[in-house]
Amino acid sequence: MKAQKRRLVHQCTCSQCQYHSYSGTAKQHRAINRVLATLDEPTRRRFAGLLAHQWGRGSVQHLHCITGLSRMTIRRGRGELARVQRLPVGRARQSGGGRKPVEKNSRGC
């Protein structure tokens, strides 16, 4: 079985967390980052999109500061929530994506 790479927990860069690291807001931001560290790529994107949708205007920039995800990733996650895509069980991506096998790429033999 393939060992999963452990993702580091992002440190929030918002001014609230910088000045008051033990405030309720800072605790909430740390909790969001701990959850994001456990998720795979598409689920992380959708979770950030869900938070952006719930928080409303200005939330994409705010989530960018909290999570370290790019603004385009958060917007993409918000868009994915609007349209439901079903993937086969156990898959994180659509089939056919990624690098082609080495046998197909190599010429000669």
Image (spheres, grey):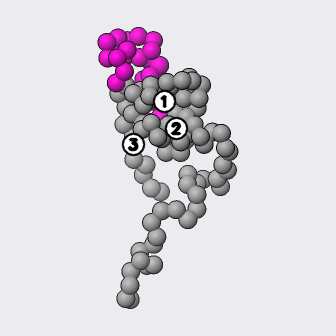
Answer with mark 2 or mark 1, whichever residue precedes in sequence: 1
Magenta span of residues: 13-39
Under tag 3, what secondary structure?
loop
* Residue behind mark 1: 60
Q: CA distance from mark 2 to mark 1?
A: 7 Å
Residue lying furthest left: 19
Query: Does residue 74 belong to the magenta stretch?
Result: no
Q: Is residue 32 visible?
A: no
Q: Residue at x 39, y 27 (%)?
A: 65
Task: Confirm or deny contact between disc 2 and disc 1 (CB under 8 A).
Answer: yes
Under tag 1, what secondary structure?
helix
Q: CA distance from mark 2 to mark 3?
A: 25 Å
* Residue 46 in the image, given as x and y percentages of width and height: 56, 38
Type of amino acid under label 1 = Val
Under tag 2, what secondary structure?
helix
* Residue behind mark 2: 75
Q: Quadrant of the C terminus?
A: bottom left
Type of amino acid under label 3 = Arg
Q: Is residue 69 above or below residue 93?
A: above
* Residue behind mark 3: 6
